[in-house]
Image (cartoon, coloured by chain):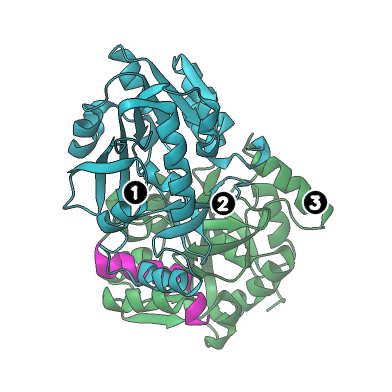
Chain colours: A green, B cyan
Amino acid sequence: MKSSQDAYGKQLLDEYLGQKKTSEIIERDDNLILTGSEEGMYFTEYEEWSEAEREAIGKARGKTLDIGCGAGRHSLYLQNKGFDVTGIDNSNGAVRVCKMRGLKKALVRSIEEIDKFPKNSFETILMLGNNFGLFGSRRKAKNILNQMSRITVENAQIIAGTLDPYQTTDENHLSYHRLNRRRGRMPGQIRIRVRYHRIVGEWFDYLFVSPAEMEDILQGTDWQIKEFIGSSDPNYITVIEKSVLPGKS
Amino acid sequence: MKSSQDAYGKQLLDEYLGQKKTSEIIERDDNLILTGSEEGMYFTEYEEWSEAEREAIGKARGKTLDIGCGAGRHSLYLQNKGFDVTGIDNSNGAVRVCKMRGLKKALVRSIEEIDKFPKNSFETILMLGNNFGLFGSRRKAKNILNQMSRITVENAQIIAGTLDPYQTTDENHLSYHRLNRRRGRMPGQIRIRVRYHRIVGEWFDYLFVSPAEMEDILQGTDWQIKEFIGSSDPNYITVIEKSVLPGKS
């Protein structure tokens, strides 16, 4: 990402260097604007996370890849537990913050670039904090899930958080679902950009899916849902396990 | 204001009816975006106000006009003290909230329309919460100050809050001052709009002035500064008194 557009990274840097809590501003392509996270959320410690998130990270095992690592809250927690963990983020600023905070393996790399990792590199892929959304679209998800299969070992897992877009009565969101259906997008496929001070980030797609939609996306890939964590909430986390059919790999 | 653009009013209504605290999002015409107020600020009670604001409102006397009354925090305080107070705001939603909260005299009226009030209507004009800014520009301020002279009694006063734009080292603001100078505007004359959910408010000018600039604006009008309250802070409040020269009225 061009640093002139790295609104998210600049905000994380300011928050880290200035020791002040901020809340990011997200703009959606229907003009909706909202503050996208609780103040200081990206720098929270284990004790401040939701019960579901604490349970989910407890399931990490082996070499771990944290996709969209942000300020490194999940990666640093695991590193402190002795894990070999690599954090990647497409934001320069985010990765700089991770390094300043002591994360040993932090790379500027987007989810589209994970095929740069060698075969069998990881046993766990973390996509917490709604980062299932980084798949962006149904088609891109299937594509990337195949790459994930290649860079992970046999018994690998993906631990991914998302939000069921249908658990809302907010007309702002319901009308957006209708707009998306009209233009042939998944209802929960939001096109957003981050704004911070005078920096206007690039538009990108972020995908919220229901459990049924997630199952549909995994259909035909090497991955299947093993477990839902905290599934009564709009936010939920899924443990997805690799299940290569005999003879397929 | 067309209700389809009344982002500010819709936010106040949602906050009041939903009993939830919100923080407004302000966009400036150089793409700067920020949350413009503390959460729930428009609904704060006397005890939560700054010392300067509490001191300032203690100076109100006689029939009072509260310009840009918002959710009515200042007007309601004075009404409860037995004042005859009229709150005006150009936001429909804001005035609806004031009425629901029990403000007896609340009108949808902008600062440009105060000449609709009869001669000698008020003894105090309140422009707290940085509402000196509603003057918008140097020229408009002089114009409106003349109307204010007409609708107020002889010993009237204006109690107005603003922010000294030069008390900053933030490059976002310093570069905006330069931009404004280049286009012939006062450095602290910001062009902003309020955004709330999918509502994009209209652009409007809001004026921040240093004490010297305020004196310059009052030059040649019937008004002069009597007192500064809390002037060591970037935010300060001024008591401006009517001082018609002999023979002038």
Q: Which chain does the residue under circle 2 lie in?
A: A
Task: Assess disc 3: are there few (<14), some (14-19) or many (≥20) residues with their C-alpha within 10 Å of its C-alpha.
Answer: some
Task: Assess disc 2: are there few (<14), some (14-19) or many (≥20) residues with their C-alpha within 10 Å of its C-alpha.
Answer: many
Residue B184 picture location, percent across and down: 48, 69
Give the overall secondary structure of the magenta segment.
helix
Q: Is residue B201 left or right of residue A4?
A: right
Q: Is residue B223 left or right of residue B111?
A: left
- Please tell me which residue is depicted at 61% across the width and 75% down the height of the picture: A149
Tags 1 and 3 both on a single chain = no
Residue B49 picture location, percent across and down: 25, 34
**Badge 1 is on which residue?**
B218
**Badge 3 is on which residue?**
A181
Can residue B14 be seen?
A: no
For marks 1 and 2, give the CA distance: 39 Å
Residue type marked 3:
Arg
For marks 1 and 3, give the CA distance: 57 Å
- Of callouts 3 and 2, the N-terminal one: 2
Q: Choose between A218 and B200: the one closer to the eye.
A: B200
Residue A167, compared with residue A246, is above or below; it is: above
Q: Choose between A126 and A3: the one closer to the eye.
A: A3
Q: Which chain does the residue under circle 3 lie in?
A: A
SS at badge 2: strand
Residue B15 picture location, percent across and down: 47, 31
Residue A172, compared with residue B82, is above or below; it is: below
Which mark, by number, is residue A33? 2
Tags 1 and 2 both on a single chain = no
